Image (cartoon, helix red, strand yellow):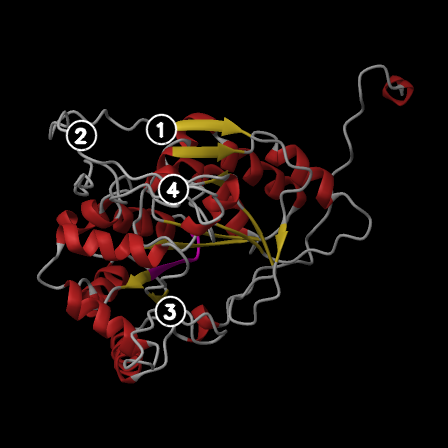
């Protein structure tokens, strides 16, 4: 009988497997035909495909998120966070939510031009534009592509508000834009800090900035006058939940004004991917982690690991979830996080003003 080749984590990658997407008519499994060697797997390299959408602003009506529009310069994310709830979207491309999600990326090089066109429409009404809600706008390929920076240049010129979520210190490259925007009440930033343990971070988020770098970025943003908070996201039962108070203390000590958290979400294929990851890296805690996941959505008997209901998908609804909420609230209060000024911060929309359209070459008006 032919046996499947055992799953094995790859250095620098988060997912352990690369199973076919749920919409594919067939699925393939690597089997040992007698010629397989433990070290003969080729190194997985990242590829980037350009795409040219007609629009770049995505709308949503979710009542449990504080924005109604977002922009993602990239699809897929090289950070490789095994828990990323955006992974299932790669199935719509005929790709795997596993290793494909972190190695076969899509970029939108025309994002800034398309955004400018959308902002100039007569019926457009400004509101905070969220970036980093699906994939990280400062993932490694941004160093070369600079699509996020070009988008920020447009928002700056239009006096349009933006909220950014990232786990990369690359955001400091754009302080020359973010600082002046912050002075006009147009920007806020949230740094995701999942753990203070560098070894754990390398397993969970293999190509993201180290925790210490993220905290230094928090300090630099605060020093530049940019409103900055820390997201303890995700809180993973039996893996990093014991770190909540320490992460919040480090955030407050680095100048963060606010903090929030999100419980681990396991939609679609993420459930299997995360279970594989637990089995590879924390087999001694895997059963406990999954049992607590079932408890935090309030249905431990069924073994269900995800509840997509609004108001519950990011906070949970069980005894474990209630305990985390209390711990988080007490720590924030003791550390002075989420005080009135931070809670009531609002981006300005009254400054929105599309600049004059530059004349095109040959335009007769350019003669005057």
Task: Pinpoint residue 267: horizontal percent, then vertical percent.
Answer: 41, 61
Q: Residue at x 40, y 56 (%)?
A: 85
Residue 74 location in percent, x, y? 49, 39
> Spatial distance from mark 3 to mark 4, Cα to Cα?
24 Å
Which of the two discs, 4 and 1, labels the residue nearer the N terminus?
4
Q: Which one is nearer the viewer's eye here, 152 or 240?
A: 240
Per the rendering, the mark at residue 46 is 1
At 19% from the left and 56% from the top, the residue drawn is 278
| Front: mark 2 or 3 | 2
Q: Is residue 359 above or below residue 308?
A: above
Name the N-terminal-most of marks 2 and 4: 4
Question: In the image, which is nearer the foreground, mark 2 or mark 4?
Answer: 2
User: Eyeballing the image, is 44 above or below 298?
Assistant: above
Q: Tag on residue 306? A: 3
Mark 2: secondary structure? loop
Per the rendered image, the range of residues in magenta is 225-231
Q: Give the left or right position of residue 290, taking residue 285 as reference.
A: right
């Amino acid at each position: 009988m032919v046996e499947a080749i055992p799953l094995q984590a790859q250095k620098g990658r988060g997912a352990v497997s690369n199973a076919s997407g749920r919409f594919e008519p067939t699925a393939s499994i690597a089997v040992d035909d007698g010629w397989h060697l433990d070290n003969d797997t080729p190194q997985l390299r990242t590829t980037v495909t350009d795409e040219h959408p007609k629009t770049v602003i995505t709308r949503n009506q979710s009542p449990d998120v504080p924005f109604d529009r977002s922009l993602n310069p990239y699809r897929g994310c090289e950070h490789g966070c095994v828990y990323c709830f955006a992974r299932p979207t790669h199935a719509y491309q005929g790709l795997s939510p596993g290793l494909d999600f972190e190695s076969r990326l899509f970029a939108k090089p025309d994002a800034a031009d398309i955004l400018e066109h959308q902002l100039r429409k007569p019926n457009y009404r400004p509101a905070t534009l969220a970036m980093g809600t699906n994939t990280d706008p400062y993932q490694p390929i941004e160093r070369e592509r600079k699509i996020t920076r070009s988008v920020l240049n447009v928002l700056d010129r239009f006096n349009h508000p933006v909220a950014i979520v990232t786990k990369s210190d690359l955001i400091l490259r754009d302080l020359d834009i973010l600082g002046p925007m912050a002075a006009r009440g147009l920007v806020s930033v949230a740094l995701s800090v999942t753990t203070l343990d560098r070894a754990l971070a390398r397993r969970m988020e293999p190509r993201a900035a180290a925790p210490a770098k993220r905290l230094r970025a928090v300090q630099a943003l605060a020093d530049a006058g940019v409103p900055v908070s820390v997201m303890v996201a995700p809180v993973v039962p039996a893996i990093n939940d014991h770190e909540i108070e320490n992460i919040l203390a480090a955030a407050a000590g680095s100048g963060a004004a606010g903090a929030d958290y999100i419980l681990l979400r396991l939609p679609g294929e993420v459930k299997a991917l995360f279970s594989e990851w637990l089995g590879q890296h924390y087999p001694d805690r895997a059963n406990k982690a999954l049992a607590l996941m079932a408890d935090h959505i309030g249905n431990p008997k069924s073994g269900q690991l995800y509840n997509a209901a609004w108001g519950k998908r990011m906070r949970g609804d069980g005894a474990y979830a209630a305990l985390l909420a209390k711990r988080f609230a007490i720590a924030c209060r003791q550390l002075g996080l989420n005080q009135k000024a931070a809670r009531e911060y609002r981006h300005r929309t009254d400054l929105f003003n599309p600049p004059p359209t530059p004349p095109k070459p040959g335009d007769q008006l350019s003669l005057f």
